[in-house]
């Protein structure tokens, strides 16, 4: 298989690149940080093709995809993984610029890369799109505001892809993890405050990037007549919270 993974320079994306390469597959690794992709290329060798791509910039997507050599063009699996959360403040305290960046990356970026690669999959009557959603797309929580809403888009977009793609041989999955450590997600969310990021995982046994990579690999290696519509994973230490009620005294 040829697998294109966005956001492959760290976290889930890098773990998925390693997992698919270990399974004997070729990986096109896309992200903005070229140095990180080059290190992954040194590690994984010819199984990996790095391409610099900012999914928020249509010209950058076009340039990145144009650099893919002919032999790597029939992409079997697209993993729309590039994404981020910024902040945990309540909506009135949020920055519009940060909301916009999340929407540009998690929604518009995911849609743009899908739009670019889907027609070739449909023409070949085969392919798989794994969208990385989140429990935040399904479960509201204080401070989840725009981030959770971007992941709700991922969930419904995936379901609607399924509606449109039935009968084409092209599959689509929303892979929606909960608390997962070992990535830069919280460092980014807390805007570089690494101590605050570390506190998120204190006293927990969170999911690992390798868990997510194994799940993606399982989805991609199922027989072609099986479509996983939605797969939500949580660490055992995580559960659901109660609803908030503000009472007047
Ligand atoms: P990381 O921060 O480690 O990885 C995010 C990746 O996205 C990086 O490789 C980054 O690369 C890339 N990225 C960000 N913005 C852009 C952009 N504009 N263009 C291209 N690439 C971009 O976090 P995770 O691995 O944890 O997150 C991966 C996905 O999983 C995200 O969509 C996240 O929302 C989701 N998720 C994470 C969970 C968690 O608890 N960790 C749980 C549920 C979902 P670069 O900066 O080099 O461009
Ligand atoms: C990341 C999981 O719970 O921080 O998508 O939103 S959560």
Image (tube, rainbow, N blue to C red):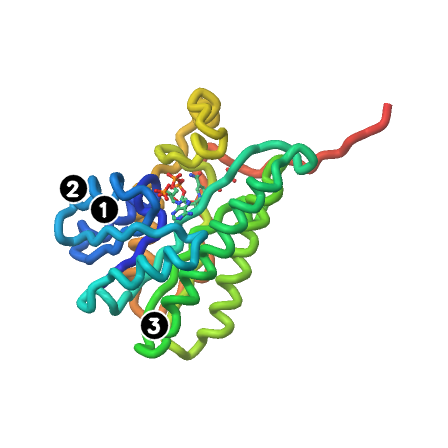
Badge 2 local density, few (<14 within 10 Å), some, or many (20+)? Answer: few
Comparing marks 1 and 3, which lies closer to the viewer?
Answer: 3
**How many dots with numbers?**
3
**Along the viewing direction, whichever of 87 and 203 lies nearer the viewer:** 87
Left or right, 150 with reference to 19: right
Q: Would the CB of label 2 be found within 8 Å of ligand 1?
A: no
Q: Which residue is mark 2?
A: 43
SS of the residue under disc 2 = helix
| Residue 175 can be seen, yes or no | no
Q: Which residue is mark 3?
A: 121
Q: Position of residue 195 (x, y in %)?
A: 44, 20
Comparing marks 2 and 1, which lies closer to the viewer?
Answer: 2
Disc 3 and disc 2: Cα gap in Å? 29 Å
SS of the residue under disc 1 = helix
Label whose residue precedes the other's in the sequence (2 or 1): 1
Identify the residue at image location x=27%, y=43%: 34
Identify the residue at image location x=50%, y=40%: 85
Q: Would the CB of label 3 be found within 8 Å of ligand 1?
A: no
Label 3–label 2 contact, CB within 8 A: no
The relative height of residue 142 versus residue 32 in the rendered view (above or below) is: above
Identify the residue at image location x=31%, y=61%: 65
Q: Quadrant of residue 145?
A: top right
Label whose residue precedes the other's in the sequence (3 or 2): 2
**Along the viewing direction, whichever of 68 and 201 lies nearer the viewer:** 68
Which labelled disc corresponds to residue 18? 1
Disc 2 and disc 1: Cα gap in Å? 9 Å
Identify the residue at image location x=37%, y=55%: 60
SS of the residue under disc 3 = helix
Q: Position of residue 153 (x, y in %)?
A: 55, 56
| Residue 86 can be seen, yes or no | yes
Label 2–label 1 contact, CB within 8 A: yes
């Amino acid at each position: 298989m040829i697998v294109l993974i966005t956001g492959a320079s760290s976290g889930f994306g890098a773990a998925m690149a390693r997992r698919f390469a270990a399974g004997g597959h070729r990986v096109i690794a896309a992200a903005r940080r070229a140095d990180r992709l080059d290190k992954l290329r040194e590690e994984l060798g010819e199984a990996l093709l790095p391409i610099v791509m900012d999914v928020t910039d249509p010209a950058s997507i076009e340039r990145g995809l144009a650099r893919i050599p002919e032999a790597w063009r029939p992409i079997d699996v697209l993993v729309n993984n590039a994404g981020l959360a910024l902040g945990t403040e309540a909506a009135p305290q949020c920055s519009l610029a940060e909301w916009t960046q999340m929407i540009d990356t998690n929604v518009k970026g995911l849609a743009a890369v899908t739009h670019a690669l889907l027609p070739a999959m449909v023409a070949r009557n085969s392919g798989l799109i794994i969208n990385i959603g989140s429990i935040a797309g399904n479960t509201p929580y204080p401070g989840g505001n725009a981030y959770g809403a971007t992941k709700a888009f991922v969930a419904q977009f995936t379901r609607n892809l399924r509606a449109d793609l039935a009968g084409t041989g092209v599959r689509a999955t929303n892979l929606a993890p909960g608390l997962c450590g070992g990535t830069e997600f919280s460092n980014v969310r807390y805007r570089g405050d690494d101590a605050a990021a570390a506190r998120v995982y204190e006293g927990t046994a969170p999911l690992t990037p390798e868990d997510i990579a194994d799940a993606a690999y399982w989805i991609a290696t199922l027989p072609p007549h099986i479509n996983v519509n939605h797969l939500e994973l949580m660490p055992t230490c995580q559960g659901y919270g109660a609803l908030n009620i503000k009472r007047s005294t």
